[in-house]
Image (cartoon, rainbow, N blue to C red):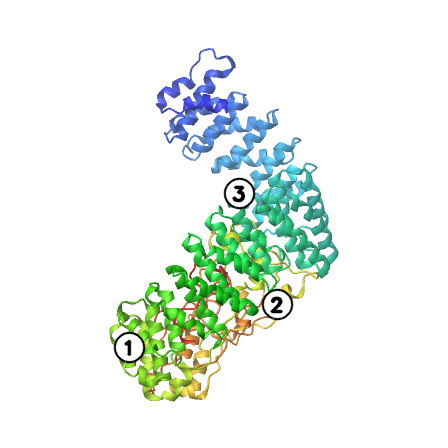
Amino acid sequence: MGDSGRDAKFFQRGRAQELKAELNDDKKDKGWVKKKAALKKVIANATMGNDMSSLFPDMVACMNIQVLDIKKMVYLYLINYGRVRQDLIHTTIPGFLSDCNDRNPLIRALAIRTMSYIQVPVLISALIDPLRQSLKDADPYVRKTAAICVAKLYMYEKRMVDKHGFIGMLRDLLADSNPTVVANSVAALTEISERSDNIQLKLNLTVASKLVSALQECSEWGQVYILESLLFFVPSDFADAEILAERVAVRLSHSNSAVVLTAAKVILYLMNYISSSEFKEGLCKKLSPPLITLLSSGPEVQYVALRNILLIIQRRPIVLRNDVKVFFCKYNDPIYVKMAKLEIMYRLTTEKNVSQVLAELKEYASEVDVDFVRKAVRSIGRLAIKIEPAADRCINALVSLIQTKVNYVVQEAIVVIKDIFRKHPNRYESVIAILCENLDSLDQSEAKAAMIWIIGQYADRIENSDELLEDFLYSFLEEPVEVQLALLTATVKLFLKRPAAGGELVPKVLKWATEEVDNPDCRDRGFMYWRLLSTDPAAAREIVLADKPLISTETDRMDRVLLDQLLLHASTLSSIFHRQPQTFIRNAKARYIPDSPALDEGARRYASSHIYTRPTVKGPSVPRVMQPRSSSSAVRAAGASGAALAAANDAPPIGGAAHPSLSLLDTAASAGTGATAEGRAVHEQEDSVENSGVQGHSANVSHAEVDGPPSPAESGIGPVAWARHEPKSAYRRDSVESMGGKANGTDVTGAATGGSGEDPYAMLGDDFGGGGGYAADQPVPKLSALDELLM
């Protein structure tokens, strides 16, 4: 600290000529004091942004001074200006080569490290022989530095590394007697494997055991590197995985959070190769205390731990099963920590602890932070859907919150009560009167749309439903599209249930929707309703008033395959974003569980030959287009023939030939950016058929069954799709004409299958606030307003 204070005086802007004179001062300089002071001024000025490149020859001359402190400053200067002065970089080569043979190992390591930093062709060529010697140096400090230099060299010139056999020399260093050398060698090989297309790191049992033995003597980051490398070991026998997991479990008691999370990642990976359920349960119990300990760290570490815990408890529900109280929010927790805790609380809630969690959530609903309150209210509604015996208590809690008359609480409660009505139809109608008392406080589109849906759904039980809808209709043209769609559908429902009450409203709304609204979704839905009501009112009643599929919290769960992939990236940014790394890091690679005779059957269907090799799904593949089931009357009302639907389903992908079926992971790309073109086409067809009269169908996807949580397509929740991202103009006017009976050859479904190769699991929604879906980490984005209101 004292040296830092004394060095502060050097941070004053100086002229290059003055500094040049100080560097070349020939006066007697005992202990090189003046030379060191001049060098510090040069480094300080370079740090402040002054151009010191003109001093390059003078700094090179200082390389001949065999003093470590001077060497460090000169090499730091060369790293900064080596690429700028490539015309003079060849003058440094004799000094570098001399230092590579110096008696001091610190100078030898410093020279080889600096040469690897300055990635200039002439210097890289001169680096080859010193680097080969350094990898075999007698001093471990030089060897461990040289190991990292190989990885740096590989980033610059891959062919040179392969040509001179540096990969083999790194592999030999794995058997080094020094744990630090082993750790750096592992780090270099891992980095090279991640960046290479043809070099794949694979560890056998002997090497893996030796690496685990070296953990005790390594530094914290050395332990992280070694633990990370154990993901490249594929157990061929259950016993190998069990023994290795037991040895790694010791690292869970480490004080460094990175070591703990990386050890947990390795254990979760090895559990895929363990058959004994009792042994796996014991490992899960060992995971819980270290994860809880991480929550006593600072808020940043807490957040990282919470995001990783959210993945772990979905894949291994036994972990932290009885520790929901640990995640109760503290008054001084940052908002991002509170949000993360709320999501974990919801997932750990069971019938046994729901009373405690519900009481805690009611307390949170009285906090001052609006987003936190919304999330708490939303969680109460989600619990009513998740745990059926607790639905009555959740409804009572929501009613009591509504009676507080706090605007944002009331609106969020209305949104979740609408979802509860979908889960428990005809059960809590007594609450509707309380909701209607708060219509004047609604100023958010989601809350308005939810309330309008309730009024339309129960129009025959609300005496003044026509008056309530008419109040909303006064501002129809100024409302957001979500509210306009809700009003359009609710008015049609009112007319079908109470023709006398809705007879005046329907023509007015349809005229607005088809003539004065610019949004194509709203306009085309208006045309569709107009055609249905004018051609076949009975079919319109059957379509619009059909029984809706019950909603479920199954969509809260991530797909088993995606969870396994994300857990292979635990303790990294992927585990925080809950996204595959290739979606936000250029040239990053996704990870997959390698195949092995010991791998459990559920994961084997999606196993790969190597952790970085894209797998081929074994078993039934997924049909390219979902086949909706439709009633004959609904199809007649829409004017769509069976041949038209068949033509849509058999349509070849855009820009390619027809393909009968395509496996999920075969379509994955290295950098997915959202919903696939195929997914968009499927959803266009689903929604178009649904809106044109096909009711009560479900997504008939032949998804490969695996152990663990079902995917949304398997959960049986009707026409909810995995990645709903539809174009604005899903319905065309010529389709409407076709619905009216004018055979113009237009396909009613409007489906267009795409041959996109993007990863269907690439993007994953994150909802930290109050708006959207049941979970903060859904594999399925929230349904659009159009879909919710038609269902």
Question: In the figure, 63 relative to 493: above or below?
Answer: above
Residue closer to the observer: 209 or 9: 9
State the SS at label 3. loop
Which quadrant of the view contains residue 22? top left
Q: Earlier in the sequence, mark 3 or mark 2?
A: 3
Q: Nearer the viewer, mark 3 or mark 2?
A: 3
Whether tag 1 and tag 3 are in contact, CB under 8 A, the answer is no
Which residue is at 46% across, 50% downward? Answer: 335
State the SS at label 2. loop
Amino acid type, mark 3:
Gly
Q: CA distance from mark 1 to mark 3?
A: 55 Å
Question: In the figure, 669 relative to 37: above or below?
Answer: below
Residue closer to the observer: 355 or 143: 355
* 542 left or right of 517 in image: right
* Image spot of residue 463 (x, y percent): 36, 79
Which residue is at 61% across, 32% downward? Answer: 142
Q: Earlier in the sequence, mark 1 or mark 3?
A: 3
Amino acid type, mark 1:
Val
Q: Does the rendering let one see residue 614?
A: no
Residue closer to the observer: 50 or 458: 458
Residue, disc 2: 706
Labelled disc at residue 162: none
Question: In the figure, 625 relative to 66: above or below?
Answer: below
State the SS at label 1. helix
Residue, disc 1: 509
Return the residue found at the far left.
516
Whether tag 3 and tag 2 are in contact, CB under 8 A, the answer is no
